[in-house]
Image (spheres, helix red, strand yellow):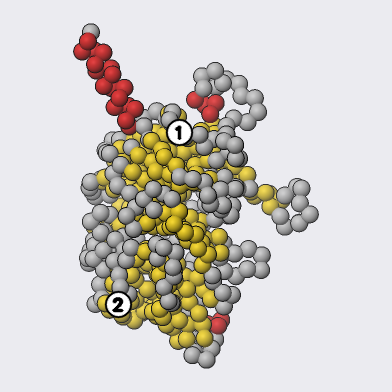
Amino acid sequence: MKNLLFVLLLSSLVSFAQEPQFVWNTANTKPNLDITSKFYGNLSEGIYVYNNIPPSGTEFNPSITVECFNEKLDRNFKKNITVDPLEDFVNVVYLNKKAFHFKSLFSKDAGKNTLNAIGINSDGSFDKPIAIAGINAEKLSKRGRFDVASSPDGKKLVILSEPEWVKDENEKITITLYNEKLEKIWSSEQTYAYPWTRAVYNEPFVNNDGTVFILKKTDMKGEGNTYSVFSFNGKSLKEFKIQLDGNKKAATLVKSFSPDGNLTIAGYYTEDAKVKIGFGTAYHGSFISSFDKSGETTKISAVNPFEKRKDIAAKSIIFNGANTILMGEEFFINAKSASNSQDMFAKDYAYYAKNIWIDGFDASGKSIYGTSIKKDNSSNNDFGRWNSYFSALMKGKIYVIFNDEKYRYDEKKKAIVFGSSPRIPVYATIDPNTGVAAETRPIANFPPLFGEKEPAMFLHPDVYMKLNDNQCIIKAENTDLYRLGMVSF
């Protein structure tokens, strides 16, 4: 009997230890509702929180803020980044242990569109702008564009310079690689084997070894989505087509570097002629492509049909040894004319984020499982910011955290619910090797973020950053303020 009691006690402690533990900082930041947030950095040099508020009305550029938090998640500073009307915002990246803001400015007198890099230090000071790249341009309407990306370790930077299109010519780009000190390693002008169009889609990536990859949409005039991945190591440009045979079209995809530095692209495809997420589009399968970190070869190219699903959005990629896991979600938006508005163009938006899909692939790209977790979140006119989910591989398990209706976890209220039910944070775990999901459970020890004196605060679950195998930075917010938190597993 004593041995049995010991086993039960040990099992209880293990179960408790696996439940996510949260610690929150002071709620001292007031966000705009329509906001995009990203995390950069680490605890020793500072966690940068980059907020991009899209332009509205007569504005042409986004409103951007950058904050920095120390190892205790106390805020060091909050800075507004000014983007003047004649400037183009390009990106904010993490390089050399700090954030860098990139923006470009056209000068008619100089006949050039110039890209500037501005370092943002952890004490809140800004470095002097550095003119780092340029595109010859005769006028503002034909100034071209820049794309910027940094490597996962923050020690490499790639800049893609794309001049304005020229009719009846093939598309030209300039690829330039820099180190963490913004010293040029190499630069090369390249020409695609595709005709130039007014609209171009080139998304650059660079791994820790300095190999550059570009995801290019190759049918800008077509109705579907066809893509190629180009690699460049400073010597030659190579094309790898993402092979989806027949009438298959990539509908939604995500990209990530594996721990080895290989670029992996995975997503879902449809066999319908057009791709329209949120219109009941049927998805017929998944695909996965992986490219060696050297940029010389394709490692995986696989297509896996499945029983039809609808309105899936690919969310993220998780690597588990030789296996790859694609995280997805059923997501769609409904819009209708606002009934209580004087503006005839005003719309009411309903956001729906439903079942979570977990698709596992082996080293060859073959499907080894497809698992779903039941979820049914919806909201109105709030950009659906609390409807999605967190997912990360922690201590050998995939943890999924999202907000759910409290009554679903109360046996006394499951049958009848009067009025609205408060939301609570819940979690489930998935075995990354088998795809077996544990029962979704409420987080019992969650700090009192729900029903505080201030308006109820909810997890913004899909805004997070994994620090190590035990900890993540996560975010909770309402329309008035937000908090950063540390979640431990």
Amino acid, disc 2: Glu
Query: Residue 27 at what x, y percent from top left?
Result: 52, 46
Between 110 and 447, which is closer to the camera in this rendering? 447
Residue at the top extreme, as displayed: 1
Up-down relation of residue 358 to residue 95 (above or below): above
Q: Is residue 438 shown to the viewer in this render?
A: yes
Q: Residues within 10 Å of mark 1 (few under 14, many from 20)?
A: some
Q: Residues within 10 Å of mark 2 (few under 14, many from 20)?
A: few
| Mark 2 residue element | loop
> Tag on residue 446?
1
Residue that numbered label 2 is attached to:
183
> Tag on residue 145?
none
Distance between the alpha carbons at the discs numbered 1 and 2: 47 Å
Residue at the bottom extreme, as displayed: 109
Instruction: Specify whether 361 is left or right of 419.
Output: left
**Residue at figure coordinates x 56%, y 74% from the top left:** 84
Query: Residue 174 at what x, y percent from top left?
Result: 36, 79
Amino acid, disc 1: Phe
Up-down relation of residue 367 to residue 87 (above or below): above
| Mark 1 residue element | loop
Q: Are marks 1 and 2 in contact (CB under 8 Å)?
A: no
